Image (cartoon, rainbow, N blue to C red):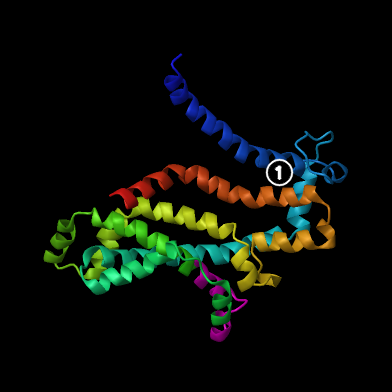
Amino acid sequence: MNPSVAWRYGRPALVLLLAGLAVGVPLWLVAVTSAKPQAEAIKPNLDLPQHWQPGGNYADAVSQGEMLRGFFNSLLVVVPSVALVLLLGAGAAWVFARRKSKLVSSAYALCISGLLLPPAVITIVMELRQLGLANTRPGMIAVYTGMYLSTSIFFMTGFIRAIPLELEEAARMDGATPSRIFWRIVLPLLRPVIATATIMVMLYAWSDIFYAFFVLGGGEQATLPLNLYQVASAQLYLNNWHLVFAYVVVMSLPMVAVFLVGQRKIVSGITSGAVK
């Protein structure tokens, strides 16, 4: 066989193999360890359990790890953050896409600069303390909204620019106000990008522990990842890797379901917003 032909067909297989190893091995380690008894899970490995007890491990992780409280805390932070990112991002993107001026262009460049510039954690915490929002859910919501708003504006602006302006002009001629045009015409047309932004923000915010650690600091308002860190550091979970990995599996299930349902929308929304 011609080497160039072999490489053309072998390269995708090689990429899939490497991706499968990079993703599949950690997933397998988590899955099998979460089903082992404590004696077998002291040193996590890829071997199958000699004695299976996934039900008991998952039940202990849910009850002893206070997962229900962490689940509702995550919902109370993630859901408002997603709603604000979508609403503010769509409104700002509409302005950036339709108005042409140096001031608007400068504001757009400033807004999407968040794609490249990482948030300064110390500055964020100090500002939240000055505002009285440190260790509060509103403060965490504000941080997530600011972090992911740039991504939302970037994709939505590109998508709105591809929407024919004649649709909005026809609505204005019929007497529609700007708010009515936004809610009845622009927002419904943004569904592919809205779905993408929703899934992406949920995936990032649901699994975040770094910013949650500095902003919330734990306690009764700890989200699922932060709660996992706290209980894994406690005496209950010390060397109990079967409970730790069981917690990880249960915590990941909602976002795995979201990703499986919306994976096609992620690709279509990204290409629609970035290419158009």
| Residue under the point 63% across and 62% down | 209
Q: How many discs appear?
A: 1
Q: Give the main secondary structure of the magenta stretch.
A: helix
In the displayed orientation, state which residue is furthest to the right: 39
| Residue under the point 48% across and 29% down | 12
Q: Is 93 on the left or on the right of 17, as rendered?
A: left
In the displayed orientation, state which residue is furthest to the front: 3
The image position of residue 158, as x and y in percent, is 30, 56
Is 143 located above or below residue 208 in the figure? below
The image position of residue 81, as x and y in percent, is 49, 66
| Residue toward you, 113 or 182 | 113
Identify the magenta region: 128-144
Image-quadrant location for residue 214: bottom right
The image position of residue 73, as x and y in percent, is 62, 65
Q: Amino acid at mark 1?
A: Val
Image-quadrant location for residue 115: bottom left
Image-quadrant location for residue 40: top right
Mark 1 sits on what residue?
30
| Residue toward you, 126 or 80 | 126
Q: Is 95 on the left or on the right of 169, as rendered?
A: right
Is 84 located above or below residue 31 in the figure? below
| Residue under the point 13% across and 60% down | 170
The image position of residue 76, as x and y in percent, is 57, 66
Q: Is 214 on the left or on the right of 181, as rendered?
A: right
